[in-house]
Image (cartoon, rainbow, N blue to C red):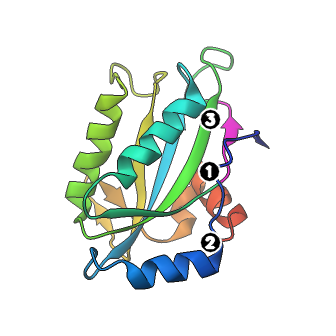
Amino acid sequence: MKATHSDPTVQPVPASVVAAVDAADTTLSNPKWAVIALGSNLGNRLETLQGAIDALEDTPGVRVKAVSPVYETEPWGVDPGSQPSYLNAVALVKTTLPPSSLLERAHAVEEAFHRVREERWGARTIDVDIVAYADVVSDDPVLTLDSSTDTWTETGFAARAASRAGWW
């Protein structure tokens, strides 16, 4: 996995700025932390990632607090060379939406960027996945959540990106 040069708006925000914004943000009452993984391997991948992050930020009850650097990865679950490589990022958000509503918003963002779900590991314009939501654990097939980073090692990307971004 290699880091790619990314848009300068997709950079960590200084802690002092985050603290000042959090203190002034009265629109979120009792917010929860969530980690959202994003990936794109069709079209203008970087523009699509930024657009998806912007769409999440525009969602009432969601505040994007940090975005990891952008990484380029090979697709998995398919034959090597059968698809273009992915650009991936992870967003750390505070939200008042429950997990099911955040998932609905993630699917709406995918739909807005013309995500097609024809095959399980198919190429896609955008993939927006909730990989953690507070300390919620769910084995629901529609929304599987486990707040331990050990479970993120299946793809490995989200945990590595979050770690490299200094989130833990």
**What number is the disc on residue 87?**
3
Q: Which residues, given as a range, are shown in magenta?
A: 69-74
Instruction: Report how far apart the C-alphas of labels 1 and 3 lie in the structure.
Output: 13 Å
Front residue of 35 and 46: 46
The residue at the point 27 percent across, 51 percent down is 103
Instruction: Report how far apart the C-alphas of labels 2 and 1 lie in the structure.
Output: 15 Å
Q: Disc 2 vs disc 1: which is toward the camera?
A: 1
Q: Disc 1 vs disc 3: which is toward the camera?
A: 1
**What number is the disc on residue 167?**
2
The residue at the point 26 percent across, 62 percent down is 99
Q: Position of residue 57 (x, y in %)?
A: 39, 54
Residue bearing mark 1 = 10
Assign the C terminus to one quadrant of the image.
bottom right
**Neighbour tally class for label 2: few under 14, some 14-19, many 20 plus, Cα within 10 Å:** few
Point out the tag, 3 or 2, that comes first from the N-terminus: 3
Q: Are marks 3 and 2 in contact (CB under 8 Å)?
A: no
Q: Secondary structure at mark 2?
A: loop
Residue 141 included in the magenta stretch of the image: no
The residue at the point 29 percent across, 30 percent down is 111
Taking the image as shown, residue 71 lies to the left or right of residue 64, namely right
Taking the image as shown, residue 57 lies to the left or right of residue 4, namely left
* Three-letter code for the amino acid on which mark 2 is drawn: Trp
Residue 114 showing in the rendered view: yes
* Three-letter code for the amino acid on which mark 1 is drawn: Val
